[in-house]
Image (cartoon, rainbow, N blue to C red):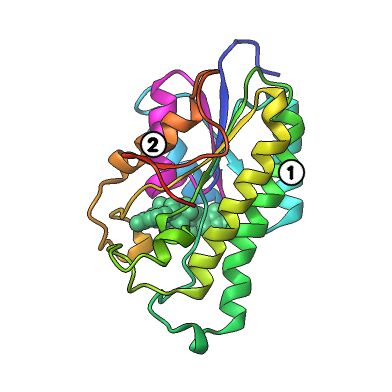
Amino acid sequence: MTKDNRKVALITGANKSIGFEVARQLGEQGIHVLIGARDEGRGKAAVEQLTSQNILATYLSLDVTDGTSIKKAAAQISKEFGKLDILVNNAGISGGNIRTPPSQTDIDVVRQVYETNVFGVTSVTIAMIPLLRLADQARIVNVSSSLGSLNMALDPNDMFYGINSLQYQSSKAALNAITIEFAKELEGEGIKVNAACPGFVDTDFNGHRGTKSAKQAATIIVKLSTLGADGPTASFRDEDGELPW
Ligand code: NAP
């Protein structure tokens, strides 16, 4: 078990893009970052890169759609650290073309996206809650999207009004609801649970059409991961402030 007093953070899907940058920025604050990755090679390469920047990082094998993998990851954190201070549920997928009309959506794609974005986050969170309860003022951040906002989806003035992706948008709307439900349960224990929208980010996720850097996108996630006791819970935010659910 860890002998120092460092905070420990698990970031899912941390081998690249936004998750990697969140890990880097949390690591820069002296937090020991656990690089959750489903591929050992990619995960260890990310750890190497962070270690070369003097960040304390450890690879953690974690496929968020695999119950056995989640159980093993929780057992490893328990054995090596005895607690978890921060959980960032970042791993997420779009299901391919987000311009496919709902009526032409393949139900198997919907199931795949929900396995990662909804059931994956839920399973990882449930598995990590006992470890989060052992930390002082733990924080959970769910990486959502403004595309999951029901209010924004109905706003003709919203810049993404034309996007109507059944699998992706409904998965992030479900994730937002899940955020509120965990937040309500854990509020009395000092654990804050919030949803973050990173913005439209230049990553593999959207074929690098995004306009924001992963570095900039990570800042709201890092902020919500390190909130003080007076910070919000059950909120949905991007870097400019609160978003409508
Ligand atoms: P990305 O470049 O596609 O990276 C996704 C990360 O998630 C990768 O590390 C990937 O691992 C990992 N992952 C996917 N499925 C996984 C699984 N089953 N188990 C473990 N890891 C898994 O995406 P990104 O742009 O960084 O997006 C990160 C999050 O931000 C997602 O939740 C996304 O919905 C959200 N978001 C992104 C944008 C944007 O514009 N990019 C906007 C709003 C919200 P592999 O390398 O092994 O595939």
Quadrant in which the N terminus is drawn: top right
Q: Which residue is mark 2?
A: 220
Residue 166 drawn at (x, y percent): 51, 74
Decide: is 92 above or below 71.
below
Q: Nearer the viewer, residue 245 or 229?
A: 245
Q: Nearer the viewer, residue 224 or 33?
A: 224
Does the stretch in magenta take in 25? yes
Disc 1 Cβ-to-ligand 1 distance below 8 Å: no
> Residue visible at 60% across and 10% down?
4
> Residue visible at 57% across and 67% down?
113
Q: Nearer the viewer, residue 15 or 171?
A: 171
How would you rate the neighbour count of disc 1 (Cα within 10 Å): few for under 14, some for 14-19, many for 20 or more?
A: few
Residue 230 drawn at (x, y percent): 52, 19
Decide: is 156 above or below 239.
below
Decide: is 38 above or below 10.
below
Q: Please provide the residue range marked out in magenta.
A: 13-38
Q: Is residue 64 visible?
A: no
Residue 95 drawn at (x, y percent): 49, 71
Q: Residue 96 vs residue 175: left or right? A: left
Does the stretch in magenta take in 74? no
Residue 181 drawn at (x, y percent): 68, 45
Mark 2 lies on a secondary structure that is: helix
Question: Which numbered mark, 1 or 2, is in the foreground of this view?
Answer: 2
Q: Nearer the viewer, residue 188 or 129?
A: 188
Q: Which residue is mark 1?
A: 126
